[in-house]
Amino acid sequence: MLASTSLPVITHDEPPRRRLPPWLKRPLPTVGMLDTRRLIQGLRLNTVCVEARCPNLTECWSRGTATFMILGDECTRRCGFCAVKTARPLPPEVDEPERLAEAAAHLGLRHVVITSVARDDLRDEGAGHFARCVAAVRERLPQATIEVLVPDFHGRRELVGIVCESRPEVYNHNVETVARLQKRARPAARYERSLRVLATVKELDPRIRTKSGVMVGLGETHDELIKTFRDLHAHGCEMLTIGQYLRPGDRYLPVERYYPPQEFDELAEIARQIGFSAVASGPFVRSSYFAETLFTETDFLRR
């Protein structure tokens, strides 16, 4: 049985949604995007691009890349910012790892990003399925690098270990926002738990690069952001993404502020000074946005 959690209080008496600033515009679909969509639909795969209503879908699919979302399209948690639907999910599909690997090979991906919904209903919370997906991609694309973007597994060391044993090059787990806003944004998660997950990865296998992401625009202060960066780095996080929160619909948390591009540049510089080996910061940056480029930057700096 799923554990009950308090949900964010979202009222309907908020002021009308603000008009997006000019720097938050995206291009129209292209032919390449349609090819990617046909492939993903044909192999019955889910992507976070679609389920989370990512604003970068057009750009990424037009480049022939996507972030695969395993373990279904229904999440056992409900976060105030996330468009993925909450429901009791279906059992994992046994052949999903092979279908995912086939899609990655067809697209010719050199860096494969795999994420999932939260599966608190499963005994291992989906950790074993993650490992099987990594193994399937590794067998089909031995030269590719693999990045997993995982839930917190309730901080269970043995589950983090199952994923680490599959040897992804990057273990990504998002803290999402500052400590003060955690309960409002992600009521079933815990700030300290997410930090501990990242530290556990480095304890289990220091060779795996650790990565996390932060959204801005939920009402955080500048000092809170800097403290979050420092906390992440202190817990072994090497790579950081910083992006603008964009409200996916009226049912979700409102945007308190749109950060202009120059502020993202300033935040990136602060993060680099703190010690992150690679930082991606900008209005449209998401956890897996140009993930290969960020990984390559880190790889270059380690040589």
Image (cartoon, grey):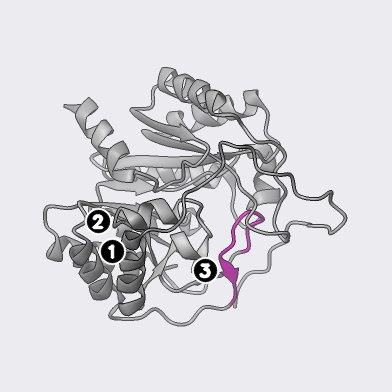
Mark whose residue sits in front, 1 or 2: 1
Which residue is at the far top? 273
Can you give x and y, in whole percent of width and height, for residue 158 in the image? 37, 58
Disc 3 to disc 1, C-alpha distance: 17 Å
Label 2 CA crowd tier, 10 Å (few <14, some 14–19, many 20+)? few
Disc 1 to disc 2, C-alpha distance: 8 Å
Hey, what amino acid is under mark 2?
Answer: Glu
Which of disc 2 and disc 1 is earlier in sequence?
1
The residue singled out by tag 1 in the image is 131
In what quadrant of the picture does the C terminus appear?
top left
- The residue at 53%/59% (across/down) is 53
Can you give x and y, in whole percent of width and height, for residue 218 in the image? 67, 41
Q: Is residue 185 above or below residue 98?
A: above
Q: Is residue 87 above or below residue 276?
A: below
- Dividing the picture into quarters, in which one does residue 274 lie? top left
- The residue at 58%/43% (across/down) is 191
Hey, what amino acid is under mark 3?
Answer: Asp
80 or 205: nearer the eye? 80
- The residue at 49%/34% (across/down) is 282
Disc 1, SS: helix
Which of disc 1 and disc 3 is earlier in sequence?
3
Q: Which range is magenta?
A: 78-87
The residue singled out by tag 3 in the image is 120
The residue singled out by tag 2 in the image is 165
Disc 2 to disc 3, C-alpha distance: 21 Å
Is 127 covered by the magenta stretch? no
Can you give x and y, in whole percent of width and height, for residue 187 in the image? 66, 55
Left or right of 145: which side holds 181? Answer: right
- The residue at 43%/55% (across/down) is 58
